Amino acid sequence: MNFTQPDFAPAYPEIFLLGMVCVVLLADLAWGEKKPYIAYLLAQIALLGCVLISFVTSAPGVVYTFSGMFVDDAMADILKILVYITVSAVLVYSRSYIAVRGMLSGEFFSLALFATLGMMVMISASHFLTLYLGLELQSLSLYAMVALRRNSPGSTEAAIKFFVLGALASGFLLYGMSMIYGSTGSLNIIRVTEVIQSGVINHAVLVVGLVFIVAGISFKLSAVPFHMWVPDVYEGAPTAVVLFIGSAPKLAGFGFVMRLLAEGMGGMSADWQGMLIILAVMSMVVGNFAAIAQTNIKRMLAYSTISHMGFVLLGILAADENGYSAAMFYVVVYVLMTLGTFGIIMLLSREGFEAEKLDDFKGLNRRNPWYAFMMLLLMFSMAGIPPTVGIYAKLSVLQAVLSAGYIWLAVVAVLLSLVGVFYYLRIVKLMYFDEPETDVLIVPQNDVKVLISANGLAMLGFGLFPQVLIALCAYAIQQSM
């Protein structure tokens, strides 16, 4: 029996990260009690190494390895680098927050790196089993991260809900994949695409399998009606974990959808477009109207996430390169906005106090005008108000929807976006027009100061010069489709 040696080069970042996770665990075991920051430093070194390796190993074209189960292309390289940068920023924002809550340990950082490894596998998957392997590696790590604060009933409850509903969604995905396999005779994405295009398939079985797959994807993207876990997890989990869940996994989720729907099931776009229309409209309606009633900012941002994912689905349902690149651009902008917003929430939190209520933002302009201005830019961007980059993210998606012929859908999206403006501007009103409830000084560490300032100003910078991000996303899609 002949054995062909696979090309390991496309998977060097994954191999390096897996090795570094082992180093983090061993270093924390040996020196963690005396030097609690060693796991943090090693995690940042691991992410920096992954960035460098991804740059060095990136090459034009599409490269398959491991018997066609793993793919390296422009979209994979760009999404992975964005994931590394996002996770690195999350760790910077989270360091002080978890330190005062007794969570600064190798567990937090190793779980974060394991989840990052799962995201990388999802992004480069070219086989249904590889997709599922990456998804479960990410999900299991996130379940554990939510439950890290063991003495908190809220965290434990959120972790149980997350786990149970996540298991249900995984079951949907597996059942859908089994039906796709039964209809096409393969789990390889390229082979599935070829069989669907040939037309020699049982279309009814394929559509049933597609329904289960879309249901599983909807849970991972927190789209209505599979959104039930999001508000409870956002409220119950530590803010540092919520920041992680709400940022990097969205990039991996976009890659997951692209591999599964756009590449694998692209020949059935007429079938899944209708499903995505329903999911997108419901997500925007429920997300925007439910957010208005919230007094907890983490729950408000949870419903905000649901509405933003509805916009992402609008771009994907256009089912062309323009729509896919618009959706990718929207996801990247959303991740930037989420990083900055939760970074400021953690900045206002302190030992024994969580800045979780909207009232905690009252009078922030008087306490610290600079951070109030950063939050203003982030809220303007989320609302899609010029000159921030959020307006271009929404416009690019709406343009893709109009090009696909869904004029009514674009009108609905615009009207629902106007609803969202209310609860974002409510935070601006609290910061600038209400009296502060406390006069506690905000004293972040220097790296957090720099990162929050860069994060907030990026909303303005990319709003004035959005071509950089738009061109990057367009290039990633064009080179990979």
Image (spheres, helix red, strand yellow):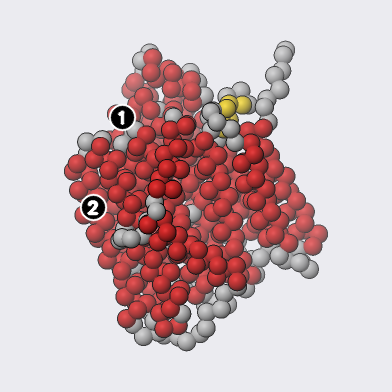
Tell whether 130 sits left or right of 405: right
Label 1 sits on what residue type?
Asp
Residue at 37%, 34% (x, y): give it: 321
Question: The C terminus lies in which quarter of the figure?
Answer: top left
Residue under circle 2? 414
Image spot of residue 67 (x, y percent): 61, 23
Of callouts 1 and 2, which one flags the residue occurring earlier in the amino acid sequence? 1
Residue at 67%, 27% (x, y): give it: 7
Seen from the viewer's position, the closer of residues 468 and 113 is 468
Mark 2: which secondary structure?
helix
Residue 378 — which label? none
Q: Name the mark nearer the viewer: 1 or 2.
A: 2
Tell whether 6 sits left or right of 470: right
Question: The N terminus lies in which quarter of the figure?
Answer: top right
* Residue 226 in view, yes or no: no
Seen from the viewer's position, the closer of residues 149 and 307 is 307
Residue under circle 1? 271
Seen from the viewer's position, the closer of residues 310 and 327 is 327
- Answer yes or no: do the residues labelled 1 and 2 have beta carbons within 8 Å? no
Residue at 56%, 52% (x, y): give it: 85
Seen from the viewer's position, the closer of residues 143 and 281 is 281
Mark 1: which secondary structure?
helix
Tell whether 320 sits left or right of 161: left
Most extreme residue toward the right, as rendered?
Answer: 30
Image spot of residue 420 (x, y percent): 28, 60
Badge 2: residue crowd in 10 Å (few <14, some 14–19, many ≥20): some
Q: Quadrant of residue 436?
A: bottom left
Residue at 56%, 78% (x, y): give it: 443
CA gap, disc 1 to disc 2?
Answer: 25 Å
